[in-house]
Image: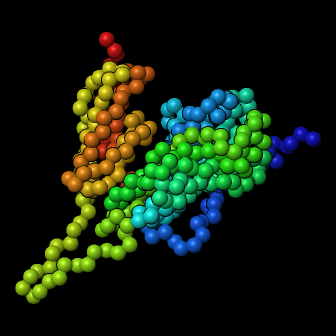
């Protein structure tokens, strides 16, 4: 029996509600992590033979951003972190869609993305809410391997780089049933780079603040330190350059130690850490495929508290 249009619309609406509704994944069992995640992004590069070689592509929907070369960025919307151990739970906003070139009308919709990072360079897991035919299913889609590299911990942020995702048993079953292809546990699912803001703190772990400096009646109390609140500014080394050349952006006015995201034409590609003076610098290539005309570089702290700084440059026709 053919489905009625109204029934199809209701099924689609129910699927979207299921994937977008809060509480898509269970929280970590046990004690709460000491710091709240106050912002950040996860960058997921899915240009791996296990997907692209089988005609499967991942696209991202807002507030996630679809970048170039099968690289998508998902904003961190909540969770917790422990800078002392490197453990974290990072909830991600947006939807990921897996689509087959042979069947574009039947995407596998993934929402409620949550990264569980165990700390100590041990990796973790990627949990999702998968929706097919109007039904939602909680799945541990992939295991994350860090290769023994511990996260970089800084005042106000933590960064994990090169997390290699590989399908779990239930993830392999999910992709096999949906695509008709044969997936197995351990198949590569791409690489993730994750930055999570943890708020300004007095120490790396944030567990115990330092004791105040003792004072006497003859010694005035020291002025409290305040986080830098000036408006960031950005500039580029070259106002005009050709495709394939290297550009360099510098910024100042950020809080010391802030993790700063670098977006080229709205595509967040890099990150840098502000020095003690609140300055950052980052070199990047101008793609050989860059179109002629105006382009932008945007710098923004992962906490989002200071606003963004934007610089412009022009790509000219190569000689």
Q: Position of residue 249 (x, y in %)?
A: 28, 37
Res 74 seen here: no
Q: Residue at x 61, y 41 (%)?
A: 189
Q: Is residue 232 above or below residue 319?
A: below
Q: Residue at x 57, y 37 (%)?
A: 46
Q: Would you say 277 lies left or right of 283 here?
A: left
Q: Would you say 113 lies left or right of 203 here?
A: right
Q: Which one is in front, 268 or 270?
A: 270
Q: Position of residue 294 (x, y in %)?
A: 34, 27
Q: Residue at x 39, y 53 (%)?
A: 152
Q: Quadrant of residue 312?
A: top left
Extreme bottom residue here? 217
Q: How is the image coloured?
A: rainbow
Res 53 seen here: yes
Q: Is residue 220 above or below residue 125?
A: below
Q: Position of residue 297 (x, y in %)?
A: 34, 37
Q: Is residue 57 above or below residue 303?
A: above
Extreme left residue here? 218
Q: Which one is in front, 134 or 29?
A: 29
Q: Residue at x 21, y 72 (%)?
A: 224
Assign the C terminus to one quadrant of the image.
top left
Q: Is residue 305 above or below residue 223?
A: above
Q: Which one is in front, 62 or 148?
A: 148
Assign the N terminus to one quadrant of the image.
top right
How many numbered markers are drawn? 0
Q: Position of residue 201 (x, y in %)?
A: 33, 66
């Amino acid at each position: 029996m053919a489905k009625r249009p109204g029934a199809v619309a209701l099924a689609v609406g129910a699927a979207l509600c299921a994937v977008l509704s809060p509480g898509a994944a269970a929280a970590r069992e046990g004690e709460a992590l000491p710091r709240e995640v106050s912002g950040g992004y996860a960058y997921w590069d899915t240009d791996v033979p296990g997907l692209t070689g089988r005609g499967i592509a991942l696209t991202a929907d807002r507030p996630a951003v679809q970048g170039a070369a099968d690289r998508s960025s998902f904003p961190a919307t909540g969770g917790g972190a422990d800078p002392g151990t490197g453990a974290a739970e990072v909830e991600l906003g947006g939807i990921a869609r897996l689509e087959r070139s042979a069947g574009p009308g039947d995407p596998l919709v993934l929402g409620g993305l949550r990264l569980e990072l165990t700390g100590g360079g041990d990796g973790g897991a990627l949990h999702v809410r998968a929706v097919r035919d109007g039904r939602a299913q909680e799945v541990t889609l992939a295991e994350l391997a860090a290769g023994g590299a511990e996260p970089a911990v800084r005042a106000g942020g933590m960064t994990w780089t090169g997390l290699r995702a590989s399908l779990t048993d239930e993830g392999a079953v999910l992709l096999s049933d949906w695509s008709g292809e044969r997936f197995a546990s351990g198949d590569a699912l791409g690489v993730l780079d994750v930055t999570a803001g943890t708020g300004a703190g007095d120490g790396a772990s944030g567990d115990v603040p330092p004791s105040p400096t003792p004072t006497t009646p003859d010694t005035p109390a020291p002025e409290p330190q305040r986080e830098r609140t000036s408006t960031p500014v950005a500039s580029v080394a070259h106002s005009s350059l050709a495709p394939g050349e290297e550009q360099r952006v510098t910024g100042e006015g950020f809080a010391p130690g802030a993790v700063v995201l670098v977006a080229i034409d709205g595509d967040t590609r890099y990150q840098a850490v502000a020095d003690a003076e609140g300055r950052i610098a980052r070199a990047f290539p101008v793609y050989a495929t860059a179109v002629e005309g105006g382009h932008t570089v945007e710098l923004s702290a992962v906490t989002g508290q200071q606003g963004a700084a934007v610089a412009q440059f022009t790509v000219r026709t190569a000689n």
